[in-house]
Image (spheres, grey):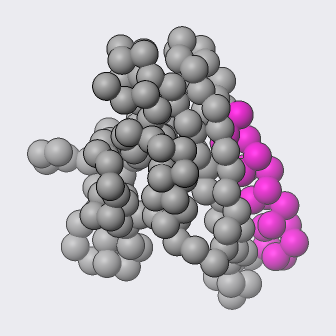
Amino acid sequence: MYESILVAVDGSNAAERALIEAIALARGLGSALRLLHVADARVPDESLVYAPPAQLAEDFRVDTEAVLPRALERALAGGVKAEGIVRRDTNRRVAEQILDEASRARSGLIVMGTHGRTGLARVALGSDAESVLREAPVPVLLVRTAAATGPG
């Protein structure tokens, strides 16, 4: 049904749950996973944090480099074919990069986690998942974190 499934991974609990669902789906359908990590390389404003920008950038680099290998290891251990890609484009929204990769890789399905924020939290923080859901030319499976409640 879906030859290739794109999974957005970022190390969050929501993305981990999405990866678990994607592995189960891929195993059942005989699909391959393409794991995408969009690395947001922007360093936070110095006034918002208590660490030097150089240290923040290094911490970010180390964290980012660990996300994709962990996700790939988990997918392969789950018995599915998987490959990974990291994108580092600070001039484009995460959602745009996910959509571009889905198109480029000809993915039949996009799987990603969502925190299930509503109201002011969603307005203040934005929602990459919502943007992907609205703009994707292929089906999108959104997986909520365990803490999220309500339908969906």
Q: Residue at x 71, y 34 (%)?
A: 69
Tell which of 73 and 60 is nearer to you.
Answer: 73
Tell me what residue is drawn at x 42 percent, y 16 percent.
Answer: 30
Q: Is residue 56 magenta?
A: yes
Q: Is residue 143 left or right of residue 96?
A: left
Q: Does 128 appear above or below 120? A: above
Q: Position of residue 105 (x, y in %)?
A: 54, 44
| Quarter of the image with the C terminus in it | top left
Residue 9 visible, this angle: no
Q: Residue at x 46, y 64 (%)?
A: 95
Horizontal and vertical percent for residue 8? 50, 46
Residue 134 location, quadrant: bottom left
**Which quadrant holds the N terminus?**
top left
Q: Is residue 11 magenta?
A: no
Report whether residue 36 is seen.
yes
User: Where 26 sits versus 136, above or below?
Assistant: above
User: Where's residue 53, x and y in %?
Assistant: 82, 76
**Measured along the vertical axis of the image, is residue 21 above or below residue 149?**
above
Q: Which secondary structure dominates the residues rendered in magenta?
A: helix
Q: Image quarter for residue 5?
A: top left
Magenta stretch, residue numbers: 51-69
Query: Which is nearer the eye, 87 or 10?
Result: 87
117 sits left or right of 18 in the view: left
Q: How many marks?
A: 0
- Residue 125 picture quarter: bottom left
Q: Is residue 67 above or below residue 4?
A: below
Q: Position of residue 10 (x, y in %)?
A: 57, 49
